[in-house]
Amino acid sequence: MPDPRTCRQLFGHDAAWREFLSVIRTGRLHHAWLLTGPEGIGKATMAFMMARVLLGAEDHDSPVGRRVSAGTHADLLVVARGVDEKRHRLRREIVGDDIRPIPAFLRRTAAEGGWRVVIVDGAEYMNRTAANAILKILEEPPERAILILTTSVPGRLLPTIRSRCRVLGLGALDEAAMRAMLSHMPQPADMPGLDSILPLARGAPGKALELLDGGGAEVAHLVARVMNGAADEGAGYDIAEQVTKRENGFSVFFDLLCNAISEKTRDLARNAARARGSDLRPARLALLWQDMVRLRAETEQFNLDRQQAVLTALARVSET
């Protein structure tokens, strides 16, 4: 996935972008913005493009534009989940220490005489300490300072945080926007391979790239076998091996499995007669979905055996 800091074009979010620009033209810019929408649809990209407008860095090749790209602009501070150096993956939370530099940054005079911009990417990962620190900033906003928060799960944020932000909702991209965005990648995605991936990505370019990297079409076929009850004990070991040998196979498998369970749950809920004639019930499938989410989270959090986690998932699906 390209670095949102360096993206030169925003695809599929024209209405949200026009709303932001119209507010800029009024001269009454809200001190905090909350960008919401599904994971992987370009919220961080839009946040950086908003920052570029505020900092006069829209020209990527200008000196100020290059400073934003390089992460060296003195009036732009970015906060996100840090990397766990022991486990070599992103930490589970944004913690208080991550937020602590923001007040000092906002108290300073803008180095380049304009706005000071803070981006909190993935605000739903803030723990209580971090969330309270952000809330305090929002309650007493400094002048000529803008906070831009992104989140895929706005319900995880404190209601008092949400109420102090102007919300921009970003929706899933249509197929044309998806293809346009992926064709503008530094290394354009394989277009023939996209035909099988696009329906699975649900309008999220980031998800499409993850599926392509993780063999999404092949993993989707494995998930279909699981959901159709064709994964007996012997086949289970083969499926688990095929999933875990891929670089992003584990996350792709659980994403697609949870999506398949959700779709089956909705289908049964819409068709009450079919649900009554089946051993499956929407409530049972909903519990299975929660079980799969928990299994994935625990496996990733505690660095457990991923092949065993896939085997456990297969067993639980077969029991439902």
Image (tube, helix red, strand yellow):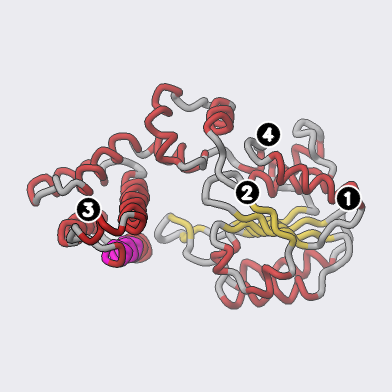
Q: Which residue position is annotated with label 2?
A: 170
Q: Position of residue 138 (x, y in %)?
A: 76, 71
Gap in angstroms between the C-alphas marked 1 and 3: 52 Å
Query: Residue type at mark 2?
Result: Leu
What separation in Å lies between label 3 and label 2 (alpha carbons)? 35 Å
**232 to 98, vertically: above or below:** above
Q: Are marks 1 and 3 in contact (CB under 8 Å)?
A: no
Vertical arrangement, residue 295 with respect to residue 224, above or below:
below
Q: Residue lying farthest left?
A: 234
Towards the viewer: 275 or 263: 275
- The Cα–Cα distance between marks 1 and 2, rounded to whole angstroms, is 30 Å
> Which residue is farthest front?
273
Q: Secondary structure at mark 2?
A: loop
- Find disc 1 in the rendering and name its residue: 112
Near-viewer residue (299 or 108) = 299
Q: Which mark is on residue 307?
A: 3
Q: Earlier in the sequence, mark 4 or mark 2?
A: 4
Q: In terms of secondary structure, where does tag 3 sit?
A: helix
Measured Cα–Cα span from mark 4 to mark 2: 15 Å
Of label 4 and label 3, which has the lower sequence position? 4
Badge 4 is on which residue? 9
| Residue under the image location 81 percent in, 74 percent down | 140
Instruction: Determine the residue located farthest toward the top in the rendered image.
Output: 192
Label 2: few (<14), some or many (≥20) within 10 Å? Answer: many
**Left or right: 242 as drawn, with respect to 103:** left
Q: Residue at x 30, y 59 (%)?
A: 272
Residue 293 spot, x, y in % from top left = 35, 62
Alpha-carbon span between mark 4 and mark 1:
25 Å
